[in-house]
């Protein structure tokens, strides 16, 4: 009789061990969750690109008949949804109303976007959970993790939103840097964010950074790769390469420590405004957001050095994100684990979506 208890116990331990090993996989691996290897048939095919196709009815229920709108971007509406487990999701739906208005190029861009996003699996990224598409009634949607604390942009520039102290800002810097290193160096081919800015950095319950690429990408404003290139690229599509991401990261650092917008009528270009202070240790504190009560000067100095390196006019002379992190870690002790959300519902969200699909 003892084997009746021992065998199920061993099976349980093996199951747990396999799940734990898969959950602790290397960031560069393509598997999405510990259940992938056990899938078969249509569900397995759905995971060729790493993201399952979901039913409209499931999302409609989760998003309260698509009435729970939380944001409207240039090319999509964002709904907040809640799965039956209580896990919250964000659902992006194209603003294009009908299939006849949906161009072939839009379909290609949509599928390429899903394929790209499904390759990214990082705790400091707003991960793609699935997608939904129907031609009649017309529907194109992407389903993401939900980050409840809004964007970094709001916390830096909207007075009514909670203030971020120096330590919180540095943790956000490190989380963003670790994610970019993963995207640039651990994925093959590498992936660069098409429009890296403070509006694309979302914050979790404990204010960990999550880089998001939620829009459909049809109306993204182009990002300059240096001050001289701003006018040159004004009418070109956004550049998505590691070098331009590094430039944008340098500009983002300056925005985080100063609390100023990248460009204003009062100061013009933020990079140009900062040039008066960034090379002078005695003037360096003039860069700092006046609302900050305390600043760690050794961290400020390193961040200022990195800003200069990252925003070099010659893309070939900019550092890689690996080099950026090496320099940051000289004075900042925040590890990759410390920069990630303490509690993440992603595992449960994926598990529920797959369970629904399997049935």
Image (cartoon, rainbow, N blue to C red):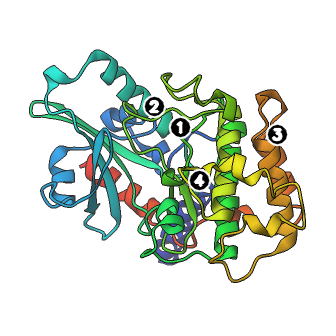
Residue 132, given in percent of the width and then of the height, sits at 26, 39
SS state under label 1: loop
Q: Are marks 2 and 1 in contact (CB under 8 Å)?
A: yes
Tell me the number on the disc at residue 115: 2
Between discs 1 and 3, the one toward the N terminus: 1
Tags 4 and 1 in contact by the CB under 8 Å rule? no
Judged from this view, the residue extending furthest toward the front is: 266
Q: Residues within 10 Å of mark 2 (few under 14, many from 20)?
A: some
> Element type at marker 2?
helix
Residue 107 visible in the displayed image: yes
Q: Which residue is mark 4?
A: 22
Q: Element at badge 3?
A: loop
Residue situated in front as seen by the camera: 24 or 104: 104
Q: Which mark is residue 319?
A: 3
Q: Nearer the viewer, mark 2 or mark 4?
A: 2
Is 150 on the left-hand or right-hand side of 261?
A: left
Going from the N terminus, do you reach mark 4 or mark 1 first? 4
**For the residues marked 2 and 3, what is the alpha-carbon distance in whole angstroms?**
28 Å
How busy is the neighbourhood of tag 3: few (under 14 within 10 Å), some, or many (20 plus)? some
């Amino acid at each position: 009789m003892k084997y009746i208890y021992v065998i199920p116990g061993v099976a349980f331990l093996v199951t747990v061990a396999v799940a734990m090993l898969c959950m602790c996989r290397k960031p560069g691996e393509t598997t999405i969750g510990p259940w992938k290897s056990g899938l078969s048939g249509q569900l397995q095919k759905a995971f060729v690109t790493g993201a399952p196709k979901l039913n409209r009815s499931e999302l409609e229920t989760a998003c309260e008949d698509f009435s729970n709108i939380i944001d409207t971007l240039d090319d999509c509406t964002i709904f907040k949804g809640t799965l039956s487990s209580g896990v919250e999701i964000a659902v992006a739906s194209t603003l294009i109303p009908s299939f006849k208005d949906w161009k072939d190029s839009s379909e290609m861009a949509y599928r390429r976007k899903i394929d790209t996003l499904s390759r990214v699996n990082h705790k400091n990224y707003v991960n793609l959970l699935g997608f939904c598409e129907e031609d009649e009634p017309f529907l194109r949607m992407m389903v993401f993790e939900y980050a409840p604390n809004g964007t970094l942009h709001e916390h830096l520039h909207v007075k009514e939103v909670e203030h971020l102290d120096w330590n919180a800002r540095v943790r956000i810097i490190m989380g963003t840097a670790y994610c970019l290193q993963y995207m640039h160096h651990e994925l093959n081919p590498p992936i660069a964010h098409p429009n890296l800015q403070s509006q694309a950095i979302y914050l979790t319950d404990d204010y960990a950074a999550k880089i998001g690429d939620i829009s459909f990408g049809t109306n993204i404003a182009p990002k300059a790769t240096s001050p001289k290139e701003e006018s040159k690229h004004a009418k070109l599509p956004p550049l998505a390469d590691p070098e331009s991401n590094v430039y944008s990261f340098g500009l983002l650092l300056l925005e985080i420590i100063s609390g100023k917008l990248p460009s204003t009528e009062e100061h013009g270009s933020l990079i140009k405004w900062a040039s008066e202070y960034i090379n002078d240790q005695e003037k360096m504190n003039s860069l700092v957001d006046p609302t900050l009560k305390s600043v760690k000067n050794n961290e400020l100095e390193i961040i200022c050095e990195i800003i200069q390196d990252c925003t070099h006019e010659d893309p070939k002379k900019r550092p890689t994100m690996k080099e950026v992190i090496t320099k940051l870690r000289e004075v900042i002790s925040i590890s990759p684990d410390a920069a990630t959300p303490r509690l993440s519902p992603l595992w449960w969200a994926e598990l529920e979506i797959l369970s629904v699909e399997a049935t």
